[in-house]
Amino acid sequence: MPVTHFVGFPDLGHRYHNAVRVFGKPAFLHRFWDQRAKREIAEGDVVVFAEGDEHRPVRKWNGDDQFYTPDLPEPKGEL
């Protein structure tokens, strides 16, 4: 079953919540486009990049995806 991955979102602010409105909540949040993110994406999965696409350079070192705090309320104010 295909799942959704979000890659490179700097935080769970407006950009993240806008992506959730369009694609739904992601099954995986990858802080960086790194080897682990590439390895966890299966054929048929939906991958949403905060900036760029899969052709951007892959980071040499894997990032800490535990950076994100899940289920924060949507930020208030202007987009």
Image (tube, rainbow, N blue to C red):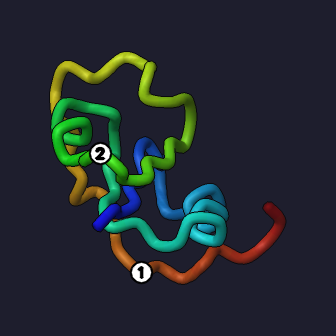
The mark tally for this picture is 2
Q: Amino acid at mark 2?
A: Glu
- Residue 63 vs residue 35, the one in the foreground: 35
Which circle marks residue 43 in the picture?
2
| Left or right, 47 with reference to 43 | right
Q: Which of the two discs, 1 and 2, sits closer to the camera?
A: 2
State which tag comes first along the sequence, 1 or 2: 2
Q: Position of residue 3 (x, y in %)?
A: 34, 63
Residue drawn 64% across the image and 71% down it:
21
| Left or right, 9 with reference to 33 | right
Residue drawn 53% across the image and 72% down it:
24
Residue drawn 34% across the image and 70% down it:
69
| Left or right, 27 with reference to 46 | left
Instruction: Answer whether labels 1 and 2 touch (C-beta < 8 Å).
Output: no
- The quarter in which the N terminus is drawn is bottom left
Q: Amino acid at mark 1?
A: Asp
Distance in Å between CA atoms under marks 1 and 2: 27 Å
Determine which quarter of the picture holds residue 63.
Answer: top left
- Residue 60 vs residue 39, the one in the foreground: 39
Residue drawn 43% across the image and 28% down it:
54
Q: Which residue is mark 1?
A: 71
On screen, residue 58 above or below 19: above
Which circle marks residue 20 in the picture?
none
- The quarter in which the C terminus is drawn is bottom right
Q: Specify the farthest residue to the right.
A: 78
Give neighbour class at mark 1: few <14, some 14-19, many 20+ (Cα, 10 Å): few
On screen, residue 71 above or below 47: below
Q: Secondary structure at mark 1?
A: loop
